[in-house]
Image (cartoon, rainbow, N blue to C red):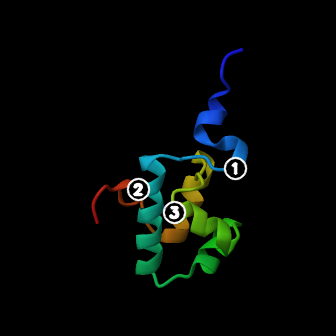
Amino acid sequence: LPEDPRARTGARQGKVEMGPFYRRLGHRIAVLREGLRMTQAELGDEMGWTRAHVSLVEQGKSRVLLHQLPMLMKALRCGVVHLMARRE
């Protein structure tokens, strides 16, 4: 039988590596949120997320779905260029 690809990523244990894109995006979200003096709970309220989910997103451990980007940009008062920027 072929090996289950989830076995290598740790998905069976609930530990999935999101990769550098999601770590960078999470960092940008945290920087933008903090620049607005907004708490994780406040961003969560605007997004319909829990504070814990915001924390996971900012750590790059949970994904932001494509359809959530417009609402996220509105909450962070930024455009896609600022959200996806590689540098501060």
Asked whether the beta carbons under mark 1 and mark 3 sit within 8 Å of each other, the answer is no
Amino acid type shown at disc 2? Arg
Give x and y (percent) for residue 50: 70, 70
Give x and y (percent) for residue 15: 63, 50
Toward the viewer: 43 or 10?
Answer: 10
Which of discs 1 and 3 lies nearer the camera? The answer is: 1
How dense is the environment of label 1, judged by Cα within 10 Å: few (below 14), some, or many (20 and up)? few
What residue is pinned by disc 1?
Answer: 14
From the viewer's perspective, is residue 88 above or below residue 42?
above
Mark pair 1, 2: CA separation: 21 Å
What residue is pinned by disc 2?
Answer: 24
Asked whether the beta carbons under mark 3 and mark 2 sit within 8 Å of each other, the answer is no
What residue is pinned by disc 3?
Answer: 59
Q: Which residue shows up at 39% across the image and 54% down it?
A: 84
From the viewer's perspective, is residue 74 above or below residue 18?
below
Mark pair 3, 2: CA separation: 9 Å
Question: Residue placed farthest to the left in the image?
Answer: 87
Asked which secondary structure carries label 2, the reply is helix
